[in-house]
Image (spheres, rainbow, N blue to C red):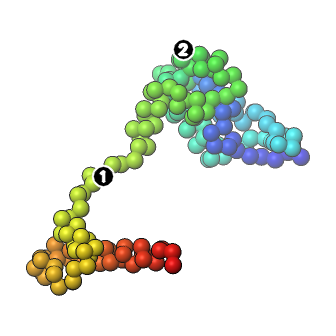
Amino acid sequence: MSTATDFVPGDPALMLTVLRGADGNLDQSILLERILSLFCTDDDGNQIIVEDSPALRRRINNAISHLKIAGLVETATDNSLSITSLGRAMMMAYPMGIDDGVLCSLPAFRNQIYDTNAPVVHERHLPNPAYGSGFSAGLGSHRLTENPYPSDSRDHEDWLMGWDEALDQSKREAETLVR
């Protein structure tokens, strides 16, 4: 029984097929036809036919993009893909397939992916001194009325939050003591 499916994400066979297509200077539409002509088998040995779908086209474009970033392929002036010398070397080194894990061994790919996907580091604000003072006061069993800041100021509120947090921490610690 024949079923239709897409390549799974990160499929090394798709990446290798794109790379081989670039080795033949295939136009991207011919590359799609080559990929669609492939037959695969599932875990049970059933034949799976790969059908054209938006998801498959995204996968192909993603593979092309990653291979370009890694410097394994480039687009020629006639919009066909051509393989680079690095691409040929990688194709020989990894005849069973190439995935993002293999591409991460290449500095150009790794640096581009990191630059694109690195977490944004926000400036860390130092804790408000009023909050720290209130926290210390709470740990020292000072009363709420000992807040030294004017009642209509932000520092007053921060001192109260610190004082309250210290009391909550003391209660949590007392609850965890073995009786």
Residue that appears at 82% across and 43% down = 43
For mark 2, give the secondary structure: helix
Tell me the crowding category of disc 1: few under 14, some 14 to 19, or many 20 or more residues within 10 angstroms, Cα based: few
Residue bearing the label numbered 1: 122
Evaluate whether residue 154 shows in this view: no
Task: Note whether 115 is above or below 87 in the view shown.
Answer: below
Foreground residue, 137 or 69? 137
Residue 9, quarter of the rendered image: top right
Task: Name the residue: 54% across, 17% down.
Answer: 86
Q: Residue at x 24, y 57 (%)?
A: 125
**In this view, which residue lies farthest toward the left?**
150
Q: Nearer the viewer, mark 1 or mark 2?
A: 1
How dense is the environment of label 2, judged by Cα within 10 Å: few (below 14), some, or many (20 and up)? Answer: few
Q: Where does residue 61 sit, x and y in percent of width and height?
A: 56, 37
Relative to 149, residue 73 above or below: above
Q: Amino acid at mark 2?
A: Ser
Q: Position of residue 93 (x, y in %)?
A: 64, 19
- Residue 143 bears which disc, if any? none
Tell me which residue sits at (48%, 30%) in the image: 109
Horizontal side, residue 103 vs residue 171: left or right:
right
Which numbered circle lies on residue 85? 2
| 44 left or right of 164 in image | right
